[in-house]
Amino acid sequence: MGNRKVILISSFAILLCIFAFTDLQISNSLYEPTNKILVPMSRIVVGAHFASDVTVGVAISVTVFMCLKKFIWKDKKNKRTNNNDVLPHSLNR
């Protein structure tokens, strides 16, 4: 039974890679959420990591992502408010 799970997950991962890196791309609305869920779960099923390892890795990734998102958006908001004196291209003629 364990070998069937590994074969199923491996074949699904290979199909995702084929769709991701070739002209046969499927829509991102299907690929991205599936990839974000199946990669950590496949690591647990295969036995490469414990569930706690995957959970801590996801927590660290989300924390870093949220901090970077706040930093990047803060920088973009400042640039937008400081450039009020710049004229649109149509008025520069």
Image (spheres, rainbow, N blue to C red):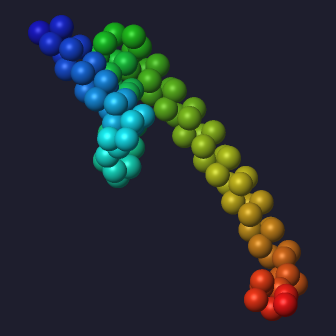
Q: Is residue 89 visible?
A: yes
Q: Residue at x 81, y 91 (%)?
A: 91
**Image vertical order of residue 63 relative to residue 2, above or below:** below
Q: Nearer the viewer, residue 7 or 14?
A: 14
Residue at the far left: name it: 1
Q: Residue at x 81, y 68 (%)?
A: 79
Looking at the picture, tell me which residue is in the foreground, 43 or 91: 91
- The front one of 46 and 27 is 27
**If the image is split into quadrants, where does the C terminus sit?**
bottom right
Where does the N terminus fall, quadrant-wise? top left
Q: Does residue 37 appear in the picture of this structure? A: no
18 to the left or right of 79: left
Residue 40: x %, y % from top left: 39, 26
What is the x, y in percent for residue 31? 35, 43
Residue 51, relative to residue 73: is it above or below? above
Image coordinates of residue 64 in percent, x first then y, are 63, 39
Tally of numbered tags? 0
Left or right side of 73 for 9: left
47 on left or right of 66: left
Residue at coordinates 64% horizontally, 52% vertically from top-left? 69
The part of the image, by quadrant, that contains residue 89 is bottom right
Residue at position x 28%, y 18% in the image: 10
3 is higher (above) or lower (below) than 85: above
Horizontal side, residue 8 vs residue 32: left or right: left
Q: Of residues 70 and 26, which is closer to you in this image? A: 26
Q: Quadrant of residue 5?
A: top left
